[in-house]
Image (cartoon, rainbow, N blue to C red):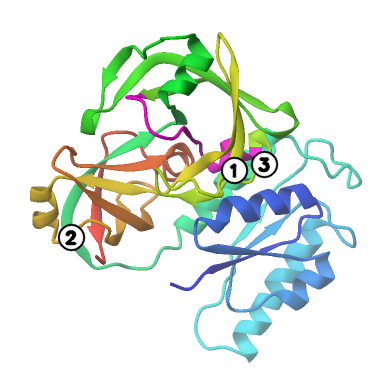
Amino acid sequence: MQKRCILCADPDPELRSNLGFLLAGENCVLEAAAGGATLLTQLRRSTDLVILPQQLPDMSGFDACTALRRQSGLIRKRRFKGKFNTPLLWHTRKTGKLKEFSMEYSEIEKITRLVAEAIASQSPAEVTTGFQVPVGVSARHVHLTQADVETLFGKGYQLTKKKELMGGQFASNELVTIVGLKLRAIENVRILGPVRKASQVEVSATDAVKLGIKVPVRDSGDIKGSAPIALVGPCGAIYLKEGCIVAKRHIHMSPDDARRANVKDGDIVSVKVDNERATTFNNVTIRVDPSFTLEMHIDTDEANAARISTGMKATIVNN
């Protein structure tokens, strides 16, 4: 599948770095433009989205927008046949000072959500299989070994059950704080039981930005070479040299569900949600096990961008 090209003219290196990281999992590549003049020379038909700030080093965002639209028209008229109308995302800074490149976390999060929405709205037409799957939105959570449970909560401690989940898992009553680089932390992260052979932390890409760590997109359990993270409990703390991931979106199915959907364990499919955002998710992994209940799992970033809530229906396409 061809990657989406996003051209970012924002002078903030942290914003460009975070956006590039957050959107890499959405099959997008971020290209940087040093200013308005550079932006115009880099614009091409394959550009899917342009991000403009209120002020660039060499011109205002308004002037850049005007020039960009003029350039788009010339490209359409002289070089290509058919429609060419590159979408724009224009944002402003709280400070309004060009030399202050540091942005608040909330601003980066908002821009990321807007970019994801703009990209999602450009999804191509698909052929549907008609097989529908309920969606479950998965928040950040932790899996622990028994040894790590005892370090965090005390010797001999056992996780207590709050809610039953599929496949013999459960949401526990126990919560921990996860800590990234520069002591950036997220509190009240729930532990899922039962205990595992290796401890693992699953976060969203936006959580990773807040924590200040680069987290790979992985299947659950695939933690080799993943991001380091620390966990703090009421009785102690642990440091994982690897174990923090952004979970790859997936669908849990029983063997009967898999037969009806004409898929098998390990297949990669696309899934469409028909709401006001009309979003299609690609690279969705099929997981089949007799203990599974039919449900697609996406994280909070994906759900927020597409305005999806737990219980909504999605349809498998192009499997």
**Label 3–label 1 contact, CB within 8 A:** no
Q: Closer to the camera, 101 or 293?
A: 293
Q: Closer to the camera, 273 or 255?
A: 255
**What amino acid does circle 1 point to?**
Ala
Q: Which residue is mark 2?
A: 263
Q: Position of residue 123 (x, y in %)?
A: 41, 63
Magenta span of residues: 193-209
Tell me the crowding category of disc 1: few under 14, some 14 to 19, or many 20 or more residues within 10 angstroms, Cα based.
many
> At 83% across and 64% down in the image, what residue appears?
34
Q: Which mark is residue 108?
A: 3
**What amino acid does circle 2 point to?**
Val
**What amino acid does circle 3 point to?**
Ile
Report the quarter where the C terminus lies. Answer: bottom left
Please report whichever mark, 3 or 1, sits nearer to the chain's N-terminal start.
Answer: 3
**CA separation, marks 2 and 3?**
38 Å
Which of the 4 image quadrants contains residue 269? bottom left
> At 33% across and 41% down in the image, what residue appears?
297
Asked if 272 appears above or below 74 in the picture, the reply is above
> At 83% across and 71% down in the image, what residue appears?
37
**CA separation, marks 3 and 1?**
21 Å
Which of the 4 image quadrants contains residue 308? top left
Q: Which residue is mark 1?
A: 227
Total number of numbered discs in the rendering: 3
Asked if 221 appears above or below 58 in the picture, the reply is above
| In the image: residue 13, left or right of residue 292 | right
The nearer-to-camera label among 2 and 3 is 2
Q: Position of residue 69 (x, y in %)?
A: 68, 70
Under circle 2, the secondary element is loop
